[in-house]
Image (cartoon, rainbow, N blue to C red):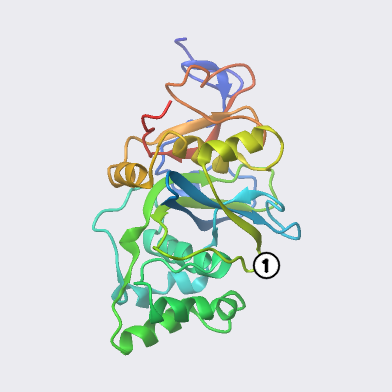
Amino acid sequence: MEGAAEDGEIAGFPELTGARLPADTARSELPTDGVPIRLAATVMLVDDRPDLHVLALRRTDASTFVAGHTLFPGGAVDDGDLDRRWVDLVVTPKVEPPALVDPLALRLAAVRETIEEVGIALGVERGDRSDELVARRIDLETNRVTLLDLATASIAGGGPKFDLSVLYPVARWVTPMAETKRYDTAFFLALCPSGVEPVVDGREAVHAEWCRPADALARWEAGELTMVSPTVSMFQCLATYSTATEVLAAAVKPGQARQASVLDETSDLVRFEGDVDFEGPGRRLTLGWVWLESGSVA
């Protein structure tokens, strides 16, 4: 397999096409077709019920992006997430993966979108403060108030800072070219706060459920669920763990980022370098990197 690649093939992988890039590739260096690439974040909420379950939701059919798809709570970074006043209002990890372009904004977007879409507040103790955030979810979603406004008022009243270290980054996926919208999305893992249940907003999310990762994959393979490769890849990774404790322990100690390959975006299992069928006829590299190590479940 030595020698130069031809016609877009990858050197060393002659049947594999696409761009071989490191996980920390700057957005300005990503393949482009002129469609702007926006920052976004999504959260995989996990819980033991009694074994590992992850919260999945279904996007409304009226959505202009991945309509009707099963995915995780999340959305694009907005101007409020980029406000530098947040620095004094949050607790963040001392070290962030280099693949995260703007880690603070991404973490804030993840928290905000989870409140808006499924009514679950991360990074705050359950009680009056979290209840207030969830009670204002429609105001947040319709921009009548910002999360910064609510956090500022809460902390001024003696409340603690938002603890954003409860979110663990495990992957980065960039929408492929030829789509009308493109996102550079950070995937976070977080333990669901005790005693809370999701309530969808009915606007962006129309259904939410706790599911075993392996069961979600089986339903997707049976055609019961519609998912794109980033979501599929995360269910594949989670399916190798038995409990939320195990997968969160793995997320704390990230492994080497692995770039993914696919046959297509919607109907094929994702493969990573080292997998038997990582390369092959028709397979191409994605703009997706995962650094969550696989668990011990076969």
Q: Amino acid at mark 1?
A: Gly
Q: Residues within 10 Å of mark 1 (few under 14, many from 20)?
A: few
The answer to which quarter of the image holds residue 293 is top left
Q: Quadrant of the C terminus?
A: top left
**In the orientation shown, which residue stands out farthest toward the left?**
94
**Tag 1 residue:** 202
User: Secondary structure under badge 1?
Assistant: loop
Judge whether 30 appears above or below 1 on screen.
below
Q: Between 287 and 54, which is closer to the camera in this rendering? A: 54
Q: Between 200 and 116, which is closer to the camera in this rendering? A: 200
**In the orientation shown, which residue stands out farthest toward the front?**
50
Q: Between 230 and 225, which is closer to the camera in this rendering? A: 225
Residue at the location (36% across, 78% down)? Answer: 85
Residue at the location (53% across, 83% down)? Answer: 145
The answer to which quarter of the image holds residue 88 is bottom left
Q: Is residue 200 left or right of residue 22?
A: right
**In the orientation shown, which residue stands out farthest toward the top?**
1
Q: Is residue 282 something one can see in this rendering?
A: yes
